[in-house]
Image (cartoon, rainbow, N blue to C red):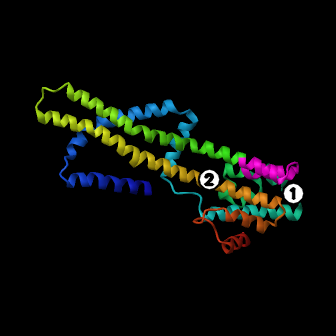
């Protein structure tokens, strides 16, 4: 929503001031289809040549994600914390073997089904159950599991940020493609030197539209989308860090309510539930 608001404000300010100062918007509109075809065509071609198919698909999905609200809300984290508390509490009271069925088949587990927002999230469920399975097996200590968790989170970070890097490279190339379009326009103008000055002026103006569009699209649209996507992906990574912190605290012998508090503390402040909110939510569930 705010992406569209930002773009509308940007367009209104740029073109509104241009028109108010006596600019001829007709020159831009006349050149727009040709310049946009040149710039977009070259940019899309370079984007396809520069990235593997999984990155291309992830980038397209990421652009769509930018127009949606974040799913990482306080309510989601309340559910996540309550789920972690229930699992650890059951393991503490009945022993680690009591959660073996929940770990092996989370989709049919009453614990995971109790919290659908996170229980139906494949990545979250897989991350939790993988490390609970290691805890149940008892073959790894806390330091070994922490090292493995860090490696997985780092891998997730690099994989998730590949589309961001692709969009940033695209943004960096758009001004250059704008210059390419402008140079072609100048070449076309130089081939028509016998035309009246009014005609040549219009042709030069159309050529300069290419430079303008390249810079405008790069820093007004592509770069902001890359930045917003990066922020959204960081939110997903923070959720994994929260789970990691909670499980490690439990492995080190802390009670479930204390382990969950460890996890709560690593969340971003704008979505972090208070201690009282978390306690009330757990008791309600």
Most frequent secondary structure within the magenta stretch: helix
Q: How many marks?
A: 2
Q: Quadrant of residue 187?
A: top left
- Residue 223, given in percent of the width and then of the height, sits at 45, 47
- Residue 154, given in percent of the width and then of the height, sits at 67, 46
Q: Is residue 46 visible?
A: yes
Is residue 148 or residue 256 the one in the foreground? 148
In the image, farthest residue toward the top: 191
- Residue 76, given in percent of the width and then of the height, sits at 63, 61
**In the picture, which quadrant includes the C terminus?**
bottom right
Q: Which residue is label 1 attached to? A: 96
Q: Earlier in the sequence, mark 1 or mark 2?
A: 1
Q: Residue at x 68, y 75 (%)?
A: 276
Secondary structure beneath label 2: helix
Task: From the viewer's perspective, tell me whether residue 240 is left or right of residue 26.
Answer: right
Instruction: Give the magenta part as a residue range.
Output: 127-150
Q: Which residue is label 2 attached to? A: 236
Q: Is residue 1 visible?
A: no
For residue 93, above or below residue 164: below
- Residue 279, given in percent of the width and then of the height, sits at 71, 72
Is residue 238 or residue 73 the one in the foreground? 238
Mark 2 crowd level (few <14, some 14–19, many ≥20, 10 Å Cα): some
Task: From the viewer's perspective, tell me whether residue 130 is left or right of residue 273.
Answer: right
For residue 42, above or below residue 146: above
Secondary structure beneath label 1: helix
Mark 1 crowd level (few <14, some 14–19, many ≥20, 10 Å Cα): some
Closer to the camera: disc 1 or disc 2? 2
Task: From the viewer's perspective, tell me whether residue 190 is left or right of residue 225.
Answer: left
């Amino acid at each position: 929503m705010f992406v569209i608001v930002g773009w509308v404000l940007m367009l209104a300010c740029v073109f509104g001031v241009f028109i108010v100062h006596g600019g001829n918007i007709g020159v831009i509109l006349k050149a727009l289809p040709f310049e946009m075809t040149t710039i977009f065509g070259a940019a899309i071609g370079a984007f396809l040549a520069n990235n593997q198919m999984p990155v291309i698909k992830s980038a397209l999905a990421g652009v769509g994600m930018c127009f949606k609200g974040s799913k990482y809300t306080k309510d989601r984290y309340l559910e996540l914390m309550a789920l972690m508390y229930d699992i650890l509490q059951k393991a503490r009271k009945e022993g680690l073997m009591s959660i073996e069925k929940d770990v092996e088949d989370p989709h049919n587990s009453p614990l995971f089904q109790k919290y659908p927002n996170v229980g139906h999230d494949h990545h979250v469920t897989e991350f939790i159950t993988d490390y609970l399975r290691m805890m149940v097996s008892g073959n790894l200590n806390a330091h070994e599991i922490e090292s493995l968790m860090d490696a997985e989170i780092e891998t997730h970070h690099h994989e998730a940020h590949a589309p961001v890097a692709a969009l940033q490279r695209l943004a960096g190339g758009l001004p250059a493609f704008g210059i390419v379009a402008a140079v072609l326009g100048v070449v076309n103008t130089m081939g028509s030197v016998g035309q009246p000055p009014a005609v040549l002026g219009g042709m030069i103006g159309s050529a300069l539209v290419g430079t303008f569009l390249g810079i405008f699209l790069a820093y007004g649209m592509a770069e902001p989308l890359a930045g917003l996507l990066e922020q959204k992906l960081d939110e997903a990574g923070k959720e994994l860090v929260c789970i990691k912190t909670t499980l490690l605290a439990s492995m080190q012998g802390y009670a479930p309510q204390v382990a969950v508090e460890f996890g709560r503390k690593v969340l971003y402040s704008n979505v972090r539930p208070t201690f009282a909110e978390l306690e009330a939510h757990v008791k309600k569930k």
